[in-house]
């Protein structure tokens, strides 16, 4: 039974190496790597009008695929709380969803050394509110956040360092629910990426806006399982990211999506 349990990982590693080698020699197509992504996180990962997954993170990988013919990706959508468990269970070989680094992720997974965008953290409030411009302004009010994401950790760390003055309300749902609750007065604010939040708000017709200074700017990474196959994938992703940074194509893609160059 013990040998049976390790065989899927060994088979995956051998299959990936065979796919990489065959594609490099022009003998076969690259083995498709399954990429976990939310598919509901516009503009980074969402379903386009043609019914296919797209978004900045997805298109970065498609650009990488063109750069390195030994890489091929299959995109699979799922809820945020299913992505890391799916990676652990070999449902995915990597994750792409505007994911930033933290000590727990660095200890458990491979993160690409080369990053591909900045994740900005800023307060989002109901449009027209003038009493909230900083986290300190939220004392005595409610701030909502999604369980397990990087914005939540940033918020919790700030709260511990500042006397736990915040009343944090935790959500399992997509950020759209938080934005709806801001408009309806159930919570006063959330902390998130303003690009994503405003894309969601526009799609739902929700009157919210970012306020105050940027609280943080963190680079985003592709996340890979920390095993032998993952080491091969990471090396190839980093090499391809270096190429598309050097030739300017990553910068152009960022400008196409956001109007500014967030590539790093």
Image (tube, helix red, strand yellow):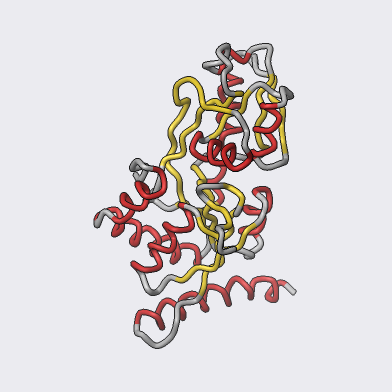
- Residue 176 position, x and y percent, is 65, 39
Q: Quadrant of the N terminus?
A: bottom right
Q: Nearer the viewer, residue 148 or 2?
A: 148
Q: At 53% across and 17% down in the image, what residue appears? A: 134
Quadrant position of residue 104: top right
Vertical side of 225 occupied by 125: above or below: above
Q: At 57% across and 29% down in the image, what residue appears? A: 191
32 left or right, relative to 38: left
Q: Nearer the viewer, residue 262 or 89?
A: 262
Q: Nearer the viewer, residue 246 or 127?
A: 127
- Residue 215 position, x and y percent, is 47, 25
- Residue 42 position, x and y percent, is 55, 47
Q: Quadrant of the C terminus?
A: top left
Q: At 48% across and 57% down in the image, what residue appears? A: 58
In the picture as drawn, the residue positioned furthest to the front comes out as 205
- Residue 212 position, x and y percent, is 48, 20
Vertical side of 134 occupied by 33: above or below: below
């Amino acid at each position: 039974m013990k040998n049976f349990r390790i065989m899927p990982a060994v088979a995956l590693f051998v299959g990936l190496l065979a796919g990489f080698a065959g594609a490099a020699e022009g003998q076969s197509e690259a083995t498709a790597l399954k990429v976990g992504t939310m598919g509901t996180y516009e503009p980074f990962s969402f379903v386009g009008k043609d019914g296919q997954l797209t978004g900045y993170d997805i298109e970065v990988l498609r650009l990488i695929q063109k750069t390195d013919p030994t890489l091929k990706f299959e995109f699979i959508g799922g809820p945020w709380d299913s992505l890391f468990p799916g990676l652990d269970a070999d449902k995915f070989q990597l994750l792409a969803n505007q994911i930033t680094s933290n000590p727990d992720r660095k200890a458990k997974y491979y993160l690409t050394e080369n990053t591909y965008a900045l994740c900005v953290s800023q307060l989002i409030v109901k449009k027209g509110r003038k009493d909230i411009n900083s986290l300190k302004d939220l004392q005595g009010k409610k701030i909502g956040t999604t369980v397990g994401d990087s914005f939540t950790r940033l918020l919790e760390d700030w709260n511990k360092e500042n006397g736990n003055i915040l009343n944090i309300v935790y959500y399992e749902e997509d950020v759209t629910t938080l934005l709806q609750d801001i408009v309806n007065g159930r919570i006063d604010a959330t902390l998130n990426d303003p690009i994503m939040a405003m894309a969601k708000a526009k799609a739902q017709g929700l009157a919210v806006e970012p306020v105050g200074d940027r609280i943080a700017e963190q680079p985003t990474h592709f996340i890979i399982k920390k095993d032998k196959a993952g080491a091969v994938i990471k090396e190839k992703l980093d090499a391809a990211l270096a190429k598309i940074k050097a030739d300017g194509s990553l910068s152009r893609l960022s400008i196409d999506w956001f109007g500014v160059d967030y590539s790093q």
